[in-house]
Image: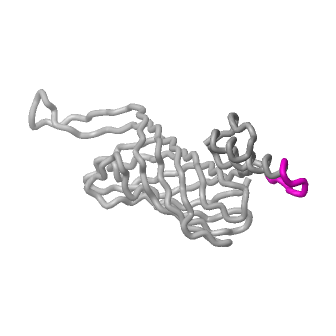
Amino acid sequence: YQTTLTNLTDMDASKTKFTLFGLKQFINKYNTSVDDTYTANDSKPKLKTRLSVFGGLSNNPFVNNPDNENSLFFGTELEIVQDKAQPKHAGFVNLRYIAENDNLQYSATQLALGYRFRFVNQDNFNVYAQTKFATLTNVNATYIVENPENPGNLIENEVSNTEFDAPLIFGLGADFKVGNGYITLIFDSLFAAFIDNEDNFPTDVALGYKFNL
């Protein structure tokens, strides 16, 4: 592509990167060189951040949960979007804590990186699909299992570990503009590409508020 650009314009394109911004800079430079009235706009896209806090209920759809128990969770998220009126694309860093309950002795702290695309994008509300493509999860759990040394007797098996995964967890969400931010509703874990759902229908719903920073 650099050779083609050089042949078309008689300008050195050896340092031109194959990105939208790099190609735009090269074209602006060429247009300016052949037209004194041309005004170049080669500024990089500006980004802005949004901070949200949320809480909700989850039946931990990727964890063995025979009685389909729901657990409380809460967390915070930093979302990065393009600084424009109605950005369609966003990246986010999500941190949440899932608490154990009396009948499901499972708790987890998860840090996730993700991407979302707004397929309905209006002034006052938007609807989006999202995926968590990388997670770092610290788990503490207690399971009742059969004693392998004494069949018929049950023992408690405690688990505590930290794992990194690339699960591609998919979900849906919506933001409703209120004040200087948004009320946000997310159905987080519908399914995952590389983690099996357990037998229960996934329930992982969060409600929160997102601030423009």
Q: Which residues are magenta?
A: 33-41
Q: From the viewer's perspective, is residue 40 above or below residue 119?
A: above
User: Residue placed at 63% from the left, 44% from the top?
Assistant: 4
Which residue extends farthest top?
149
Q: Is residue 40 magenta?
A: yes
User: Residue placed at 86% from the left, 56% from the top?
Assistant: 38
**Does residue 201 appear in the picture of this structure?**
yes
Magenta segment main secondary structure: loop
Question: Of 211 and 19, which appears nearest the observer?
Answer: 19
Query: Could you tell me residue 15's position as x and y percent?
Result: 70, 35
Q: Is residue 194 left or right of residue 78?
A: left
Quadrant of res 123: bottom right
Q: Is residue 57 magenta?
A: no
The quarter of the rendered structure image containing the N terminus is top right
Query: Could you tell me residue 64's position as x and y percent?
Result: 28, 47
Query: Could you tell me residue 120's position as x and y percent?
Result: 56, 70
Q: Identify the coloring.
A: one colour
Which residue extends farthest right?
36
Q: From the viewer's perspective, is residue 14 above or below residue 46?
A: above
Question: Of 7 and 66, which appears nearest the observer?
Answer: 7
User: Residue placed at 29% from the left, 58% from the top?
Assistant: 200
Q: From the viewer's perspective, is residue 28 above or below residue 148?
A: below
